[in-house]
Image: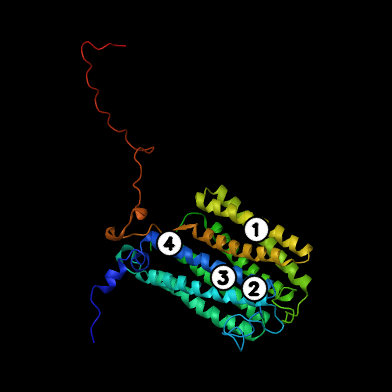
Amino acid sequence: MMGVPADLISRIGSWPVLRPVLAPTATSMRRLALAGVIADTAIMSTGAAVRLSSSGLGCPDWPRCSPADIVASKNAGQTLLNTWIEFTNRLLSFPLVIIAVLVFIAAWHYRPGGAKRRDLFWLGLAQPAGVVAQAVIGGIVVLTKLNPAAVSVHFLVSATIVAAAVTLHVRCTEGDAPPTAVVRRDLRLLSAALVAVTGLMLAAGTVVTGTGPLAGHADTPRYKLPLEGVTQLHADIGWLLGGLVIALVLGLRLAGAPRRAVRLGWLLLGLIGVQGVIGYAQYFSGLPAGLVWVHVTGSVLIWITALLLVFALRDRGRVAMPAASRTADDAVPEPAAGGPDAAPAAVPPAEPLPADAPRR
């Protein structure tokens, strides 16, 4: 059997379309990781749309759409629109798989400083592994007729995958040095508490949805809980979250934190404020599905921003790339001369004027 030419892989890796995956730079790795964040966020948003449009059982079987058909078709008790909404969400898993695999391959081949980074390898592996796990959980959700506990787990696992994608996006352009704090310890603890409360808010939100009228289908089981009670608990967590972020933003401003951290703090405060307004508006307007969908999508954006804020409060240095693989986008600009402590630059002596030149 003929062997594979020794330079085949290197030649394939030199193709422009594959070079960012098989020979990633810091810039291309960051862009691929960002694509993973966007894809994971989009699938959470479309998954919420399936449930809120009462299309959760549009395809009542798994992995087929129905016992008789692989693709979308008319099913008893379902409109064709519901079937296609659910089936389209399943089809979105294919581009998600492609992006997740590309992210993993790039993280595997990424060599900042000439050496493989184990943390990036595992964060990259979490992307395709998460897609597989979500496919299995999604099948359980369908086969249990949208059991609310299974749906809650499905959503929270998606949030965990988003967290891994955000972490990869941040870490692939950082060095591997021990983290150095850029703010006081109490502010870092406050940011960690903010992430924990945000996760609690996401979990409480799944309970509210699984208790109310938008649980996925009219015949699906619900949590045996009072809707007013779980809604009030969710709102209380939101108020706690707002108080924590106000305290953190003020602390960052007074402590002279880096500008990126302060900007993320203000962004998080704005998102939580808008989220609160939408939350009360949807409750008092009878939970319209469109407004609830905006609320769910907003919660994912809050989750991402809270995670980015934690990373902005410590420094691990810049990623080191070998000169041979560094691109123009990866170049680190040299510090400009002429700082407050710099010596004045030497001024060349003026050329003497001609004897007949006019003098002032």
Number of the front mark, 2 or 4? 2
Q: Tag 2 or tag 3, which sits nearer the N-term?
A: 3
Where is residue 263 shown, x and y percent of the image? Answer: 55, 51
Q: CA distance from mark 3 to mark 2?
A: 10 Å
Q: Residue at x 60, y 56 (%)?
A: 268
Q: Check contact, mark 3 vs mark 2: CB within 8 A.
A: no
Q: Residue at x 64, y 71 (%)?
A: 48
| Disc with the residue nearer the chain's start (2 vs 1) | 2
Q: Is residue 2 depicted above or below 197 in this figure?
A: below
Question: Relative to 242, is 122 on the left or the right?
Answer: left
- Residue located 59% across and 62% down the image: 301
Of the 4 image quadrants, the one containing the C terminus is: top left
For label 2, count other residues whose C-alpha is less than 10 Å away and answer few (under 14), some (14-19) or many (20+). Answer: many
The residue carrying mark 2 is 50
Where residue 302 sits: x, y (%)? 60, 61
CA neighbours of label 3 inside 10 A, class few (<14), some (14 to 19), many (20+): some
Residue 11, visible in the rendered structure: yes
> Which comes before the other along the chain, label 2 or label 4?
4
Tell me the element at label 2: helix
Of 55 and 212, the residue lying toward us:
55
Query: Mark 4 — residue?
Result: 30
Q: Out of 275 and 16, give the one closest to the viewer.
A: 16
**Residue, disc 1:** 272
Residue to which mark 3 is pinned? 43
State left or right for residue 256 relative to residue 359.
right
Q: Amino acid at mark 1?
A: Ile
Kind of residue at disc 3: Ile
| Amino acid type of the residue tagged 2 in the rendering | Val
